[in-house]
Amino acid sequence: MITIKEAITKAELKEYIKFPFTLYKDNPNWIPPLINDELTTFDKTKNPAFTSAEAYFYIAYRDNKVVGRIAAIINWDEVNDQQKRKVRFGWWDVIDDIEVTKALLEKVYELGRKNNLEYVEGPMGFSNLDKVGVLTYGFDQMGSMITWYNSPYYKDHLEQLGYVKEKEYLESIFPFENVKPEFFFKIQELIKKRYQLRPLNFTKTKDIMPYVDQMFDLFNESYSNLSSFVAITDVQKEFFKKKYIGFINPEFIKFVLDKDDKMVAFSIVMPSFSEALKKANGKLFPFGFYHLLKARNNSKEVLFYLIGVDPEYQNKGVTAIIFNEYYEAFKLKGIKTCIRTPELEDNVAIHNLWKHFDPVVNKRRRTYRLDLPK
């Protein structure tokens, strides 16, 4: 018999968070999150996502043993401002038993029906900066700190229950040696002169902070035309500033400013923390922090996390300036491998940015949709 319990207390949430540690303990490609980070994400008093969203966390048991988990989420900005009458599910992990999946999803349906919503989509988090999608290809590839990993049967469970693909995401990889500066060096010089632009580079994290709010404003503006986009609020900016910026080498954050010092483009690249997180196994202490710091300073693999361009400057070659700055920074760091994190398959503009680097798609993931069962 399957029983479902809502995780409310800190001890229950820890049990919720730790289930994948057991489920994937023998899988070398699953990357454990930091347990305290996850607790903060699920804490209604700490995560500002809860100012515009509600979420409930459920654990499935059989014979007093955890066999699955799921989060049922409503992003009220999405429902009220975009008129998308959607209930989300995320942080979904389960043994290979479709009955467990059905029992967990029923809690999501209950939340949707209670609020007169029309359909369910997932897996996805609270916002566009959370993890997204079921992995459907690339199970033999190592995950990252900003993606979920799952076994192949997750997709099968959803499709057997009548879910259909809603959004497709691609991830790709290319060696740094594929980056040929002749593709962007002369162009970026012309672009800088034509539009009176300049790159802004950093060596200290504290020097980045005065620009971060402006970066998030540009993020909202540059991604607003995507069907899946929900804007980042002011309080969320502060949360993500603390959560991510300190993790990233300042040399890997690039801004482009115009003659009036207005930001017209930005990019964030992260060192790969995958191996360090495996060694940390969910804990910063006693040695996890050391492994993460070592990866931050010495990783030869980087993840292109975010890139955004002011709509007024899109298709004007501004990204050539960013690529030139990264080329110089990566040479100094001895970077060997570049990874593109999930990008919507139909975002043609973003895919065209990378065509000269011959990236190879090594993972696919998708969100699934189902009209709410009556």
Image (cartoon, rainbow, N blue to C red):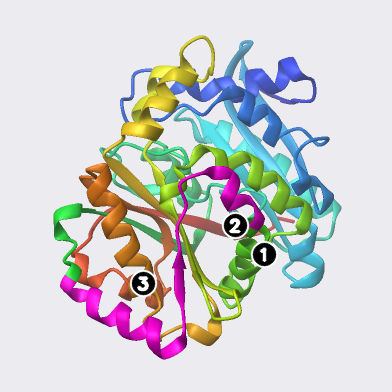
Q: Secondary structure at mark 2?
A: loop
Residue 114 in sight in this render: yes
Q: Quadrant of the N terminus?
A: top right
Residue at image coords 85%, 56%: 115
Measured Cα–Cα span from mark 1 to mark 3: 28 Å
Residue 299, percent from left and from top: 31, 35
Question: Which quarter of the picture shows residue 229?
Answer: bottom right
Measured Cα–Cα span from mark 1 to mark 2: 7 Å
Q: Main secondary structure of the magenta part?
A: helix
Q: Which residue is mark 1?
A: 230
Q: In front: mark 3 or mark 2?
A: 3
- What's under tag 2, amino acid-wise? Asn
Magenta range: 182-210
Question: Which quarter of the picture shows residue 270?
Answer: top left
Residue 352, percent from left and from top: 31, 75
- Residues under numbered marks 1 and 2 in contact, where contact means CB atoms less than 8 Å apart: yes
Q: Which residue is mark 2?
A: 128
Measured Cα–Cα span from mark 3 to mark 2: 25 Å
- What's under tag 1, amino acid-wise? Val
Question: Is 209 inside the magenta-drawn segment?
Answer: yes
Residue 127, percent from left and from top: 65, 54
Q: Which residue is mark 3?
A: 321
- Residues under numbered marks 1 and 3 in contact, where contact means CB atoms less than 8 Å apart: no
